[in-house]
Image: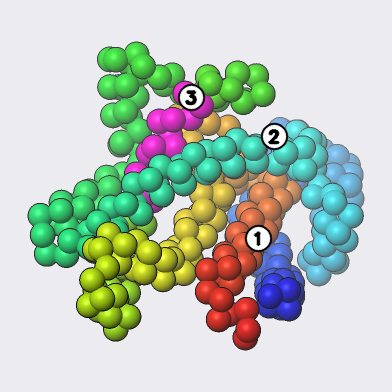
Amino acid sequence: MLRIIANRALVAIPTLILVSMMIFGLQKMLPGDPVLAMAGEDQNPQVIATLRLKYHLDEPVPVQYALWVRDILHGDLGASLRTDVPVTRLIAQKLPVTLQLAIMAMIFAIGIGLPLGVLSAANKGRALDYGANVLALTGMSIPNFWLGIILIFLVSVKWQLLPSSGYVSPTEDFWLSIKTMLMPAFVLGAALGAQLMRHTRSAMLSVLRSDYIRTARAKGLLRGAVVVKHGFRNALIPIVTVLALLFGELLAGAVLTEQVFTIPGFGKLVVDAVFNRDYAVVQGVVLVTAVGFIVVNLFADVLYILLNPRLRRS
């Protein structure tokens, strides 16, 4: 088991190198010069030259990349070209916000998608199956920003049950933080739950057609035990894959949802940085997001091994 995990971790190293090269290279292809924006309206040549020297922008691109990687290995992601605030500090401020939103959204997604997917597969062709599919298609079709606006109008403005926007840290007021994040988490979780329901249903249908399921039914086992114990357990591996991808997607930042609910997370940070041509912030956020994707998928690989004993002997 440890050998398999070590192999997966080793594969992540060239992936990270390739991702870092793509992040740095594509960033350089964006139009505009951040130094000119930093220099102000006068654009004094001496100021411009000083800024280029400070941020190593006078060096060739390969040298800039090498210096960037060197700083990363020392835990330094650079500083914002606009505010001169260290990128690591900005990420440390925004990452907990995005993590809280992602975890709460996944709770909603799992609570919606898994039960509906299992029930839909177990009742294929019946009214429950059609109803679950209608709900799933509806959840995937409704835009997040529209659902967010409707929830704000109904839940916050009309019924005054939850805060309409903003963010409160759990360390300041735990319950107010949960209340503030409930609506945006539900908006994201509903859409992800619809996707998860479709994947769960597909995986369950594939398993329920297996020979060992027919054998279990022939032995007279209860229908619920066959579906949950024998069916759902063996359908978990593709479901775990989907969950890992969905959670990684959330880590990248739900831009529209964060904008609607005024949540200061990764999505808002990277959008502002792109508009301001703040290269260091964009590179740092995208790199951390890529690392998050890799870590989540590595965790999924560990779950595969725990769920499927045959992989431990491979």
Provide the residue span drawn in magenta. Answer: 178-194
Position above or below: 239 against 92: below
Viewer-side residue, 28 vs 147: 147
The answer to whether one can see residue 299 in this image is yes
Q: What element carries label 3?
A: helix
Viewer-side residue, 273 vs 156: 156
In the rendered structure, which amino acid carries the disc numbered 3?
Thr
The answer to whether one can see residue 33 in this image is no
User: Is there CB contact under 8 Å for labels 3 and 1?
Assistant: no
The stretch drawn in magenta includes residue 179 = yes
Residue 295 is marked as 1
The stretch drawn in magenta includes residue 290 = no
Quarter of the image that includes the N terminus: bottom right
Mark nearer the N terminus (2 vs 3): 2
Closer mark to the observer between disc 1 and disc 2? 1
Secondary structure mainly formed by the magenta segment: helix
What colour scheme does the image use?
rainbow
Position above or below: 213 against 145: below
Viewer-side residue, 276 vs 215: 215
In the rendered structure, which amino acid carries the disc numbered 2?
Gln
Q: Residues within 10 Å of mark 3 (few under 14, many from 20)?
A: many
User: Which residue sits at x=48%, y=63%?
Assistant: 240
Q: What residue sits right under mark 2 in the picture?
A: 93
